[in-house]
Amino acid sequence: MKTEVGIIGAGPAGLALAHLLQRDGIGCVVLEAQARQHIEERVRAGVLEQGTVDLLNELGLGERMMKQGLMHYGVELRFLGRGHRIDFADLTGGKGVMIYAQHEVIKDLVAARLKTGGEIIFEAKDVAVSGLDSEIPTIRFSQNGIGEELQCDFIAGCDGFHGICRDSIPAGVLKPYERVYPFGWLGILAQAPPASHELIYANHERGFALMSMRSPKISRLYLQCKPEEDLNEWADERIWDELDQRFAMRDGFSLMRGAVLQKGVTGMRSFVVEPMQFGRMFLAGDSAHIVPPTGAKGLNLAVADVRVLAAGFKEFYASRKRDLLGRYSEICLRRVWKVQRFSWWMTSLLHKFESDGEFDRRRQMAELDYVTSSRAGMTTLAENYVGLPME
Ligand code: FAD
Ligand code: DHB
C-alpha cells in the first residue's frame, strides 16, 4: 500500500488533518488502534475555541455542532463565596467558545470522512514506523491478523500521549520538558441540568471545582482530587456533597443533582517535546505535548498543530518546497508554549496546592481579585481562553 501522508491516530489531530489534506487534494490514510465505537464514545474535552469552530465550519463539518453546541461568551470565576464573570465578547471583540463534546466532534469527522470515500483503518494492531529519515518512511501494522505495510511520503504522528510515534524517534533527538501536578481531576457526566448558563471555575479551600455542561440537560463536573484517587471511595452522593461545598456562595447556591452517567479520574501534567519533527515524521497534538485541562486547550492545540502541518504539505505538493514543513516545529512551538503558559497559570490560579502556606493562599486570592477586577487582567484571561490568533 502507498499513500502521500500516513496518519497514525484518529483523534482530533489525525482526523482534522485528514480533512484538511482531502480538501487540498492530497492523499492520506488514517490508522487507528481502537474500534470506531470506542473513539466515538470516549468522554474527554468539551470546549472549542473560536478558531476550531471556524475551521470545522470552513471544512463543512460544523452542521451538527452549530445546531447542538452551545456558544458561550463568558465564564465565571468563583472564590471566597462570590462569582465574577469574565465577559469574553466584550473583552475580545465578540469572540466566544463552543461547548460541544470532543466525542461528538470525532463522530462528525469520522462520518464525513467515510461518506466521502476517505480511508480510516480501525483496529490497526502492532503499528510500527521505520525509515523516518529516508525518502520512503513506512508504517507496518496488522489488520485481522494479517501484516500490512504502508509506504508514505510523510508520516503524521497523531497518536496521542501514549502512542508509538514519539518513542520511535531515535534517543537524543527530542528534548522533553515536563511538569507533573500533585493532583488530578475526578470528572462526572450527569443527567442533570447545569446550574448556570456558563462554566464556573471555582477556587475553594477544599480544592478546585469546575461546572461545565454538554447540553441543557447534561452537566459535566470536575473536582480536584489526588492523582491516584480511588473511584470506589467516591459514591455519587459524596461527589455531589463535595461539589456543593466547593461551589457554595454567600447568598446560596446548589447544583441540580441527577444520575451519574460516567465517572473518571484524569492525571494532570504539562509536557512538551522539542522539536516536534524527525526526518519525514511530524508529531501533532498530544503525541508532542500535553497541557493540564484547566484552560480547556488540549483539543484546540491539536487542531492548531495540524493546520500548520496541512499548510506545509500543501506547499510541498504544489511546489516541492519544504519551507513551511522545515519551520513546522518552530511555528507550532510558539503557540504551544503560550498555551502551556496559560494552562499552567490557570491551574496555579485555581487549585489548592498542599505545599502552600497562608502566604501563598493570600497571594492566590489577591491574584484572583486582580484578574476579576482589572480590565487588563480580565482581557489576558479572555483572549487566551477564546484562543490566540493563528500565526
Ligand atoms: P488523542 O485524542 O489522544 O488521539 C490519539 C488517537 O491515536 C487515539 O484515537 C488513539 O486510540 C490512537 N492511537 C494511540 N496509539 C496508537 C497506535 N499505536 N496506532 C494507532 N492509533 C493509535 N482536554 C481538555 O481540554 N479538557 C478535558 O476535560 C480533557 N479531558 C481529557 C480526559 C482524558 C482521559 C484524556 C486522555 C484527555 C483529555 N483532554 C482534555 C485532552 C484532550 O482530549 C486531548 O488533548 C486531545 O484528545 C488531543 O487530541 P489528539 O488527536 O492529539 O490525541
Ligand atoms: C471542560 C473541560 C475542561 O478542561 C475545561 O477547562 C472546561 C470544560 C469540559 O469537559 O466541559
Image (tube, rainbow, N blue to C red):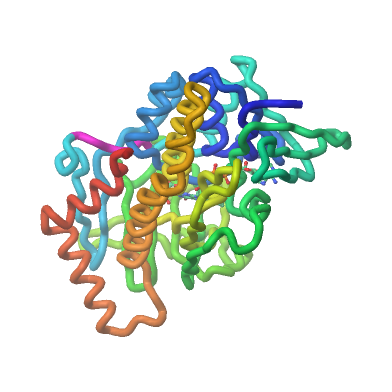
At x 85%, y 36%, the residue is 147
| Location of residue 66 by image quarter | top left
| Location of residue 245 by image quarter | bottom left
Q: Is residue 26 visible?
A: yes
Quadrant containing the C terminus is: top left
Q: Residue furthest top?
A: 116
Vertical side of 352 occupied by 141: above or below: above
Q: Position of residue 191 (x, y in %)?
A: 49, 42
Q: Position of residue 116 (x, y in %)?
A: 59, 15
The kind of secondary structure the magenta stretch mainly shows is: loop
Vertical side of 63 occupied by 199: above or below: below
Q: Is residue 391 left or right of residue 319?
A: left
Residue 95 within the magenta-colored segment of the rendering? yes
Residue 229 or 242: which is nearer the viewer?
229
Q: Is residue 283 left or right of residue 332?
A: right
At x 11%, y 58%, the residue is 374
Vertical side of 253 occupied by 21: above or below: above
Residue 27 or 132: which is nearer the viewer?
132
At x 63%, y 65%, the residue is 232
Tally of marks: 0
Residue 74 within the magenta-colored segment of the rendering? no
Q: Position of residue 137 (x, y in %)?
A: 69, 39
Q: Is residue 108 visible?
A: no
Q: Residue furthest right?
A: 145
Q: Position of residue 234 (x, y in %)?
A: 56, 64
Residue 79 or 329: which is nearer the viewer?
329
| Location of residue 29 by image quarter | top right
At x 36%, y 48%, the residue is 335
Residue range of the region highlighted in magenta in the rendering: 94-98
Quadrant containing the N terminus is: top right
